[in-house]
Amino acid sequence: MKNLLGFTKYGLIGTFAVLAPLCMGQTPKDGDKVLVRPQYPDGQKLRYNLNMTGAAAWYPTQKDLNWGKMTTDLTFVLSHKVVRKSGACTYELTGENLKTTGEDNKGRFEVTADRQRIAGNLHGTTFFAPELNPLTKEMTITVGPRWGFQFGTGLLPIAIYLLPSVDKLFWTLLTVAPEKEVASGDAWENEFEYQLPDSKGQPLKVKGAWKATGWEQYKGVKCLAMTLSAELSLKDTEVLLLNGDKVHVADGSYKADGKVLWDVEHGLMCSATAEQKILITCDRPDARALRSEVKCTLSLMEAFLGDKDPRLNKK
C-alpha cells in the first residue's frame, strides 16, 4: 500500500525509533543530579499515543521522490517480552487505534482502523479489506540498555502511515538517556550525522545542543524536561538523490527542535515532541526545490505492571 499512498520505501527505515520508553527508580529533588537508566520489569505494559503531522514536496514534482502530506494518530501498547544479555529489551507492540488522513499526487486518502476492522477511502475508492489492517499484525521493537532503537520486526505495515517523519537519528538522540548524571541547567553539545531527505551518499555533520531545562508536571507527575536543538545551513553543495540525479544545492537549511519529559522516579518517558523544517533550493542541472515540515508528539497514557500498579492512576 505504500506506493498507493505516494511514499517510497526510503523514508521507512528507523521510523519506529519513536516508539520506546525509559525506566529507572529514583525519587528526585530539585537540584539533584539524576542518572537516567532503563529498567525493564516483567509484566510491564506502556500505552502511548503517537500523533504525527508532516508534509514533503519537491517543486516541480520529481520522479521516484516523496510527495505528499499526512496526519496520523496512533494508540499502541508496548508489552515486556524479554531482556537480552546485552541489557536490551524486546517489547511486543500491539496497535489499538489508527486514524490517518492525507493527500498525495493522486488525490486524498483516509484510513480508520482498530483491531477488529479497517475502513478507508483511497483516491475516491472505498475499501474494507481486513488483510490491509496493520493493527492485526505481529510486531516487536527492541531498545538498547540506554534506550536507543536497535531493530524491530513486522513494522512495515504500520510504518507507511508515519510518513513524512522526523529524522530518525534526531528523534533517537532526543529520547535517549544521557550518558552521565544531569541536573537542571546542565547543557552540552555533540555532532551527529544527518542524511538529507531523498538523498544517498556521505551524510552531513550537524551539531546538536542538549539542555536539561528544569522540572515540570505531566498529568500530576514531576518530570525532568530536556531539550535538543540542531541547525544546519547549506550552500554550494553537491547532493546525489535517490532517483540517481546529482544536483547542486545553491541554498538550504535544516532545523529541528525537540523536548522530552522524563518521570525520573519511575524511569518513564512521559512525553516527547519534535518539530523539523527543511528547505532545499537547487539550481543545477535544473531549478528544483524541496520543502518539508514535520511535527511529532509521543505521549504516555498509561504505565502499569500486570493488571495493577499505582502509576496507572498517575498517568
Image (cartoon, rainbow, N blue to C red):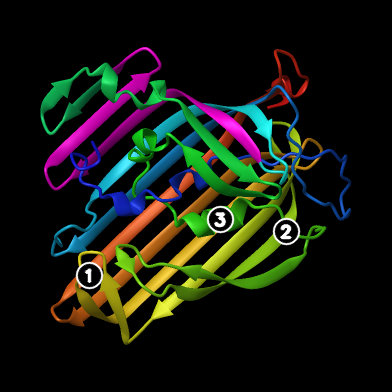
Q: Amino acid at mark 1?
A: Ala
What residue is rendered at 13% in x and 40% in y? Answer: 107
Mark 1 and mark 2 lie on one chain; the one further toward the N terminus is 2
Question: Is residue 41 left or right of 55 when viewed as pictured?
Answer: right
Q: Amino acid at mark 3?
A: Gly
Question: Which dot marks residue 212?
Answer: 2
Task: Tell me the magenta residue range.
Answer: 89-118
What residue is rendered at 74% in x and 39% in y? Answer: 23
Magenta stretch encompasses residue 228: no
What residue is rendered at 67% in x and 45% in y? Answer: 261
Q: Find numbered disc 2 in the image and state the secondary structure of the residue it sits on.
A: strand
- Above or below 262: residue 96: above
- On the image, numbered disc 3 is attached to which residue? 258
- On the image, numbered disc 1 is attached to which residue? 289
- Above or below 33: residue 59: below
Question: Is residue 46 left or right of 198 when viewed as pictured?
Answer: right
